Amino acid sequence: MSWTTPADLRKQVMRLWERGELLGSLAKGETLFPKRLTLKGPSSAEIAEQFEGIRQWVIELRSMTHCRVEMREFRHRVFGANALPDAVWLDSLEHAAAFIGKQREAARFAALLDITHTREPRLVAWLAERPLRALELADVWSRLLDICGWFQAHPRPDVYLRQVDIPDVHTKFIEAHRGVLAELLDRVLSPEFIDSSRSGVNQFASRFGLRDKPLRIRFRILDADKALFRTTHVTQDITLDAASFIELNPDVGRVFITENEINFLAFPPVKDSMVIFGAGYGFEMLNHARWLGSRRIHYWGDIDTHGFAILDQLRRRFEHVESFLMDRETLLAFTSLWDREEQQTLRDLPRLNEQEQTLFNDLRDNRLRKNLRLEQERIGFAWVETALAALV
């Protein structure tokens, strides 16, 4: 039977609910009602062939609550004068919500709408766009409005999130709701108080003028004659905040960057040199260290597609960067230690030199072995020391 059933009608209304159209119309002050639902009834031939089934179908439709069934009278040559459902109408949001069992949710949204109209009318439009998300946040909506009010009273406050002092709102609550708070604050704060170049939950603090935890850079001076501290401790593993690192300007002519911590710690002594513990794709912290522009920089990463992608990204900031131990000779010297790269980078890398590009293409196109990688920590240290001796 292809006739529209009460379950079919409820599915139609549920789709309106799930798309946010029912509650959204309430927030917009628009009306969808009376709303005519799609109804498919029996054909003339079916009326003659399935009269009893049609009678039961009519009874089911007419017994529905919260809907108005509009009937159409007709005369059949066999059964005489009769009437069939011609249209099904919902006359109000209340009826629509009741029809699908969403009365409580609709009432809760109406309450959210009332408090928002009173406390922060500029967020009514957000409720109209995200009504179901608003329902998920109903229990904490008042606190979210408190936070929006605090930021309006303290635009770009230049304090740590821990210092935001709002009754009944703790730091972890704000951290947990940074995504939705960013959407709300974008609507209530003046544009001059928003750093639009910062986006995503990890940049929430900088977007809205909070202090962020300082970026830290870890390094070692590899030349004992140029050590920053005169001690007997040979490692001198030093960590500085990015602002201090920018001003460092050490008396070395060569900088190595490596991604592996043990390689960083075990990096051999090298005259006139230092080594930085890398951060994968996170080289933003090095951007403003202008003194790096006048040093020779060597990047040592894994021999795999991601290693070359990181090299390519680093060259976007410092185009003179040279790769270190990321060559075919090193790869072939340690074939017994080859491993598998789980997910390759397939995009083009325009900043690689000819030799690097050829090796990257061989890795990306699986010409040597599928998803081949050689991790930098698998390279023997005698090989590393020989390469350093040849370099300097």
Image (cartoon, rainbow, N blue to C red):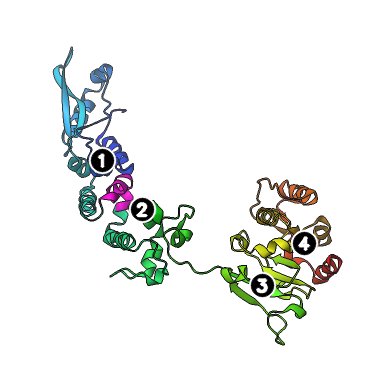
Res 94 quadrant in image: top left
Nearest to the observer: residue 262 or residue 45? 262
Tag nearer the camera, 4 or 1: 4
**As rendered, which of 208 and 93 lies closer to the eye?**
208
Say if 286 sits above or below 73 in the image: below
User: Which residue matches tag 4?
Assistant: 324
State the quadrant of the N terminus: top left
Q: Amino acid at mark 4?
A: Phe
Per the rendered image, the range of residues in magenta is: 121-134
Q: CA distance from mark 3 to mark 2?
A: 41 Å
Q: Residue 263 at what x, y percent from top left?
A: 72, 71
Q: In the rendered image, which residue does mark 3 sit on?
A: 219
Disc 2 marks a residue whose amino acid type is Ser
The reply to whether the C-beta atoms of the residues labelled 1 and 2 are less than 8 Å apart is no
Q: Nearer the viewer, residue 40 or 24?
A: 24
Q: Amino acid at mark 3?
A: Phe
Nearer to us: label 3 or label 4: 3
Q: CA distance from mark 4 to mark 1?
A: 61 Å
Residue 208 included in the magenta stretch of the image: no
